[in-house]
Image (tube, rainbow, N blue to C red):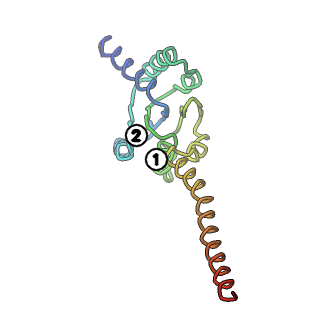
Amino acid sequence: MKREEKAAVIEELSNQFKSSRFFYITDHSALNVEKTNALRRLCFEKGIQMTVVKNSFIKKALERASQENNENYSELIGALKGFSAVMFTDSGNLPAKTIKEFRGDNEKPLVKAAFIDSAIFVGDDQLDSLVKIKSKQELLGELIGMLQSPMQNLVGALQYGSNTIGGLLKTLEERG
């Protein structure tokens, strides 16, 4: 690969790091070609962009992105050992759920590190915590549900109250 091509790869990767609020660095080195292709297909179906790239490129891209958007990626750089792939997504928990689903009884792919909206998670032991992170859509759904509940109670009370008042007025009218 020529110097210009390397610089282009690093620049593109740096731009992805700067624009993404959620990305994972993973290791799936023990997977054979068939399983790797299956993982790529699953990622594609779920809207996760998976890129296999050299650790030195990832490191340079993270350093460049760090300088430009004032994020501290040093813990991520420390996780760059062995074979690495980067997963970019619009949801903090989607790659973790996908990895967990894909693994089944296997131990790969592993999560080396994850960047979730300025929070950094290092190590595969963080996978269960990453799965539990709620996506924006899930949080909005819960918020809407919480806002609807008091309104439904109020409407129910008003409807019940109108029946009670109506019954009371009818009784008073019959007496009078």
Report which residue position mark 1 lands on.
98
Which one is in front, 13 or 122? 13
Q: Residues within 10 Å of mark 1 (few under 14, many from 20)?
A: some
Find residue 48 and name its label.
2
Q: Please, which residue is most extreme toward the bottom here? A: 175
Closer to the camera in the image, 82 or 44:
44
Q: Amino acid at mark 1?
A: Thr
Q: Is residue 9 above or below residue 101?
A: above
What is the distance, in whole Å, between disc 2 and disc 1 at their CAs?
9 Å
Reply above or below: 17 against 108: above
Residue at horizontal 70 percent and vertical 88 percent from the top: 175
Horizontal side of 64 relative to 71 (left or right) equals: left
Quarter occupied by the N terminus: top left
**Tag 2 and tag 1, C-beta contact below 8 Å:** yes
Question: Neighbour class for label 2 at 10 Å: few (<14), some, many (≥20)?
Answer: many
Q: Secondary structure at mark 2?
A: loop
- Looking at the rendered image, the disc whose residue lies closer to the viewer, 2 or 1, is 2
Amino acid on which disc 2 is placed = Ile
Query: Where in the figure is residue 7, as x and y percent of width and height?
Result: 35, 14
Residue 172, quarter of the rendered image: bottom right
Which residue is rendered at x = 59% and y = 71% of the image?
159
Q: Position of residue 37 (x, y in %)?
A: 34, 43
Residue 32 position, x and y percent, is 38, 42
**Which element carries disc 1, helix, strand or loop?**
helix
| Mark closer to the chain start, 2 or 1 | 2
Q: Which mark is residue 151?
A: none
Picture quarter with the C terminus: bottom right
Nearer the observer, 95 or 173: 173
Q: Residue furthest top?
A: 3
**Left/right of residue 134 with respect to residue 2 in the rendered view:** right
Residue 33 in picture, x, y percent from top left:
35, 41
